[in-house]
């Protein structure tokens, strides 16, 4: 994850119960520090607008956690809003004691005051709201999700992607403009023809590619069953991709695959993409830029490779959706009992490609960044689990049992016109994805 600065701004006024305020402050700091070491905190509760201004004057926050320790009027929030345009979390504390006596904190009324001002500055819903005491698990979960989402946001701003070749005819949903990616996600996109990497690949000698080939042999099963020419050509192509990515500082790629690599090169690129994904360099096929971007976000949230593929089957009774692709899933997603088997492309009958079912997981998230017909974007999010299923078809497959009814997800996403490529993330990160969408001002379609 990228390093970010999280600034905690606890506000209040001195006419409330200061012993309670001090206790709430220390407990809140403890909760935040347990989640992230990047939190910057003041020495005490900020009791005047001038104290707020003095505390934040030299800060450059990526995320602000604004908390009413006690009630404070709108001027406190205004001081923050006039200085910073970064994501903001409004954390409201539960009233500590209700005993018929003095109102000790009145944090909730302060939250209404702050929220009214935030909305005036930014618009409705342009912040995250958390309610509860520092020790509550739901509070810690929400704070953690906000921080992780902000870390991904910072990673996007540092990301340089590459589109290797163009999408095939009829696959326009994956095309992206460099200006749009920069405007909406902060991502830089460069483009290169697949031909250029093929030309680099054919120039390598067997000796130059020996190390790359040995690396692949350690990660996959059955490469020795492929024709020698295809194995050597794979190694050349793998070296060409790795060299290009390393020298260009590329963090994710979308790669053209058919027909070029079958027709012009004679060996598919599928296994190259598989190994890149296993190295946590997100790599989509069919030149799907938004698919690669979705993979990047999933990998950043979990530190693990994601699965990329088409929804190809649905079982209403079992409540599952099967995702599949020709053979480019990360080799480290393979089932342990089979390993990352090598096979031939299911349509072109040329190898090497990956040919296995994916390992099971109790927690999974289906995700896709989509571009709507009007040019705006949306996040599709659904959670569930990956079942312990063998390979469903030639190529690589994964079977997801969704929390929401599978038939509803399939019907609704089709009627909404969503794309035919999805990412399966090996964890439940729907909350983090939704918060990231809020930070990017992007619509959420969640199941």
Image (cartoon, helix red, strand yellow):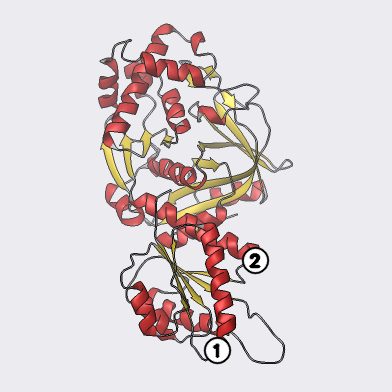
Nearer the observer, 366 or 241: 241
Marks 2 and 1, how far apart at CA: 23 Å
- Left or right: residue 359 compared with residue 210: right
Quadrant of the rendered image containing residue 76? bottom left
- Left or right: residue 178 compared with residue 308: left
Which disc, if any, is residue 190? none
Residue 39 position in % (x across, y down): 45, 62
Contact (CB < 8 A) between labels 2 and 1? no
- Residue at figure coordinates x 33%, y 27% from the top left: 241
Q: Earlier in the sequence, mark 2 or mark 1?
A: 1
Per the image, label 1 sits on a secondary structure element best described as loop
- Left or right: residue 185 compared with residue 423: left
Nearer the observer, 19 or 219: 19
Residue holding disc 1 = 16
Residue 400 position in % (x across, y down): 63, 40
- Residue at figure coordinates x 59%, y 59% from the top left: 141
Crowd tier of the residue under label 1, counting other residues whose Cα lies within 10 Å: few below 14, some 14–19, many 20 or above? some
Check the image and name the residue furthest to the right. Answer: 317
Q: Is residue 179 above or below residue 243?
A: below
Q: Is residue 7 above or below residue 358?
A: below
- Left or right: residue 408 compared with residue 90: right
- Residue at figure coordinates x 43%, y 61% from the top left: 439
Residue 441 position in % (x across, y down): 42, 62
Check the image and name the residue furthest to the top. Answer: 228
Residue holding disc 2 = 136
Q: Is residue 297 above or below residue 265?
A: below
Q: Is residue 108 above or below residue 299?
A: below
Per the image, label 2 sits on a secondary structure element best described as loop
Quarter of the image with the C terminus in it: bottom right
Residue 80 position in % (x across, y down): 37, 76
Q: Is residue 345 visible?
A: no
């Amino acid at each position: 994850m990228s390093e970010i600065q999280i600034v905690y701004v606890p506000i209040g006024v001195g006419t409330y119960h200061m012993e309670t305020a001090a206790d709430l402050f220390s407990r809140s700091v403890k909760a935040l520090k347990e989640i992230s070491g990047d939190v910057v905190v003041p020495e005490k509760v900020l009791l005047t607008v001038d104290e707020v201004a003095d505390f934040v004057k030299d800060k450059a926050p990526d995320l602000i956690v604004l908390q009413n320790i006690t009630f404070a009027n709108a001027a406190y929030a205004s001081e923050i809003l006039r200085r910073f345009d970064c994501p903001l979390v409004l954390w409201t504390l539960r009233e500590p004691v209700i005993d018929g006596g003095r109102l000790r904190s009145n944090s909730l009324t302060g939250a209404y005051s702050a929220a009214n001002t935030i909305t005036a500055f930014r618009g409705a819903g342009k912040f995250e709201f958390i309610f509860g005491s520092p020790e509550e698990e739901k509070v810690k979960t929400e704070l953690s999700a906000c921080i992780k989402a902000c870390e991904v946001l910072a990673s996007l701003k540092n990301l340089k992607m590459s589109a290797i070749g163009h999408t095939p005819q009829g696959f326009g949903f994956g095309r992206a403009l460099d200006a749009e990616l920069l405007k909406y996600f902060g991502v830089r996109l460069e483009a290169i023809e697949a031909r250029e990497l093929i030309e680099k690949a054919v120039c390598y000698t067997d000796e130059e590619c020996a190390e790359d080939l040995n690396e692949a042999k350690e990660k996959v099963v059955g490469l020795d069953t492929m024709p020698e020419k295809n194995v050597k050509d794979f190694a050349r192509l793998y070296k060409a991709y790795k060299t290009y990515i390393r020298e260009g500082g590329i963090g994710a790629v979308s790669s053209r695959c058919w027909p070029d690599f079958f027709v012009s090169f004679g060996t598919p690129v599928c296994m190259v993409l598989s190994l890149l994904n296993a190295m946590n360099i997100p790599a989509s096929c069919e030149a799907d830029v938004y698919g690669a971007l979705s993979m990047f976000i999933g990998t950043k949230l979990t530190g693990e490779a994601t699965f990329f593929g088409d929804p190809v089957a649905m079982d209403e009774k079992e409540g599952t959706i099967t995702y599949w692709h020709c053979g480019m899933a990360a080799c480290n997603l393979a089932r342990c009992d089979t390993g990352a088997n090598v096979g031939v492309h299911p349509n072109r009958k040329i190898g090497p490609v990956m040919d296995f079912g994916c390992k099971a997981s109790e927690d999974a998230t289906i995700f896709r960044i989509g571009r709507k017909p009007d040019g705006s974007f949306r996040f599709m999010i659904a959670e569930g689990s990956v079942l312990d299923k063998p390979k469903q078809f030639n190529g690589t497959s994964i079977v997801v049992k969704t929390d929401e009814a599978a038939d509803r997800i399939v019907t609704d996403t089709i009627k909404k016109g969503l794309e035919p490529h999805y990412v399966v993330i090996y964890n439940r990160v729907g909350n983090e994805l939704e918060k990231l969408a809020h930070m990017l001002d992007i619509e959420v379609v969640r199941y």
